[in-house]
Image: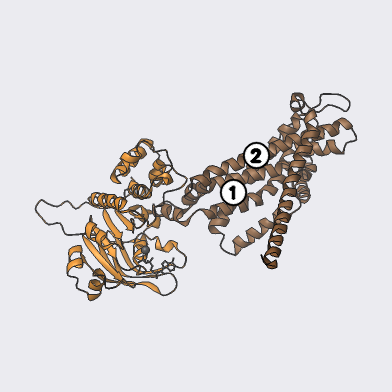
Chain colours: A orange, B brown
Amino acid sequence: MLTEKPPQHAAAPGTVVPERATLEVRGLAAGYGGPLVLRSVSLQILERQVTAIIGPSGCGKSTLIRCLNRMHEVLPGATLEGEILLDGRDVMGLDPVLLRRQVGMVFQRPNPFPSMSIFDNVAAGLVLNGVRDRALVAEKVEGSLRAAALWDEVKDKLKAPGVGLSGGQQQRLCIARALAVEPRALLLDEPCSALDPIATGRIEELLLEIKKTLTLCIVTHNMQQAARVSERTAFMLMGELVEVGPTDTIFTKPSDKKTEDYITGRFG
Amino acid sequence: MTPGYRRRKLINAACFGLTACCAAVGMGALLFILGYIAWQGAGAVRWSFLVNLPKPVGEPGGGIANAIVGSAKVVGLATLLGGPIGVLGGVYLAEFGQNRTGALVRYAADLLNGVPSIVIGVFAYTLIVVPAKRFSALSGSVALALIMIPVVLRNTEEFVRLVPHTVREAALALGIPQWKVILRVVLPTAAPGVLTGVLLAMSRIAGETAPLIFTAFGNRFWDNGLLHPIATLPHTIFTCAISPYKEWHQQAWAAALVLMFFVLGVNVSARLFLRPASGGER
Ligand SMILES: Nc1ncnc2c1ncn2[C@@H]1O[C@H](COP(=O)(O)OP(=O)(O)O)[C@@H](O)[C@H]1O
Ligand SMILES: [Mg+2]
């Protein structure tokens, strides 16, 4: 098994399970060597829920989620201070390679591996991490493609190059690729911004499906999307987290004036 | 129509004519060389020429079989030695070479590329032939590998660098260790360009003569393994061409034709290699 499963909290029937945070950020400050891009951001991303992050472009949404799986530090000059916890453990104490297997990521532009077939794209995370059992790999590839609602469209051309698919299919392929290593959480950075409404709809549907087993955090500039898919929404502005709460509340009666201005379209 | 307009049109036509002429000279030189070699050599290229050993002067039916096989061996071994070094060095430059060390390696590679091939031959002679006290296929291969390395290195660097950053990012985000990201994801993405570079470098060293004079040395018989002198096509052309015998001159032309075909074949297949990649990218 690739990933270490967290302890299961078996709840007695009838009791209310307290909401656990899969990921938690405390007092995060981050930048790229110049002025800070994120300042004192604190946020919980709750287990098996979809947390949406909204805010005008340039406010630091991508930077924030890239901190969560330590992809931020890959960029030259990147700085980071504060605490990031995965299931209560500080991720700075984890091997980034192992952390990223538990906290997957889907990017703004679909980015299948150009040299690989559809099958190999999905299998890459397993095969390149040393899984030799081909039957197991094939099984996981099929499972991931089904979860990403792509199986029926590609099952007859698994050997075809991944970059030959349409944009929406490529993005679902990237989701399948991320799911194949069985992460605890999946971070999605504006996954639909390059897609048409139909492709976007299919991705939103599959997100609602996979959140049953997975913690999701989606960055989006599309407020309807946040309203459609998320339980909780966080609003960011100029590197700070203004407000976070249940999506309904954020969109109907936000407590901060700036949030209200943004969602009513007065700026941003 | 103003005089200024007429003048401009004339200058345009003159510029076009001049550049077209120069292009035609370049193209014409290639066709002339090909045609002349074919005309001079075709008469002597027959089956027996390809499968027989050289014969003494005056005896008909001599061939260059040993040189064909010898060239394949020396170039093949040179590729085995120089190819991986060039490719991995190029990967280093592309992935980790944005610093002083990288600049130094790049500069050294360019210098090595500019070293006259005869000097490389003398170097391999001193390094291997002198201590071993004999000419050998191996020393020839080392000399050719030294010529190949900088070419493959810089070409590989270029193609690895062309791989989009998003590919690396996607792989790192899957929790794949960096060295595997580079060798198993980035390098395969660049593979068509990298392999094309290796093939072109092979066709270049296949025609090198000077580095083989003091190393592979040449041999009128079948070679005796990698640690003995060996015949090669360019060296056979050289010895036949400077000999005083008419029929050997004829053989030099024929051997040149065989070598040309080999080099052209490799070049054409290299281009074919590159094509599906540029078509498949989006
Ligand atoms: N690689 C980088 N180097 C330097 N500055 C960056 C880099 N990426 C983003 N930034 C800056 O950080 C700020 C936040 O960017 P980002 O997190 O991408 O915002 P968002 O995703 O909300 O649009 C912007 O001002 C942007 O210019
Ligand atoms: Mg962004």
Mark 1 or mark 2: name the one nearer the start of the chain.
1
**Residue situated in front as seen by the camera: B203 or B69:** B203
What amino acid is found at the position of numbered circle 1 in the picture? Val
Q: Is residue A126 visible?
A: no
State the residue position of label 1.
B87
Q: Position of residue A214 (x, y in %)?
A: 26, 52
Quadrant of image for the C terminus of chain A: bottom left
Position of residue A16 relative to residue B266, above or below, is: below
What's the residue at 25%, 73% (across, down)? A261
Badge 2 marks a residue whose secondary structure is helix
Contact (CB < 8 A) between labels 1 and 2?
no
**Residue situated in front as seen by the camera: A129 or A109:** A109
What's the residue at 29%, 62% (across, down)? A222
Q: Residues within 10 Å of mark 2 (few under 14, many from 20)?
A: some
Q: Position of residue B37 (x, y in %)?
A: 78, 37
Position of residue B6 relative to residue A171, above or below, is: below
Is B237 on the left-hand or right-hand side of B110? right
Badge 1 marks a residue whose secondary structure is helix
Position of residue B51 relative to residue A127, above or below, is: above
Quadrant of image for the N terminus of chain A: top left
**Total numbered labels:** 2
Q: Nearer the viewer, mark 1 or mark 2?
A: 2
In the picture as drawn, the residue positioned furthest to the front comes out as B1
Is B69 on the left-hand or right-hand side of B167? right
Q: Is residue A60 visible?
A: yes
Q: Which dot marks residue B220?
A: none
Task: Read off the chain for label 2.
Answer: B
Asked if labels 1 and 2 share a chain, the reply is yes
Q: Which dot marks residue B266?
A: 2
Q: Position of residue A7 (x, y in %)?
A: 24, 52
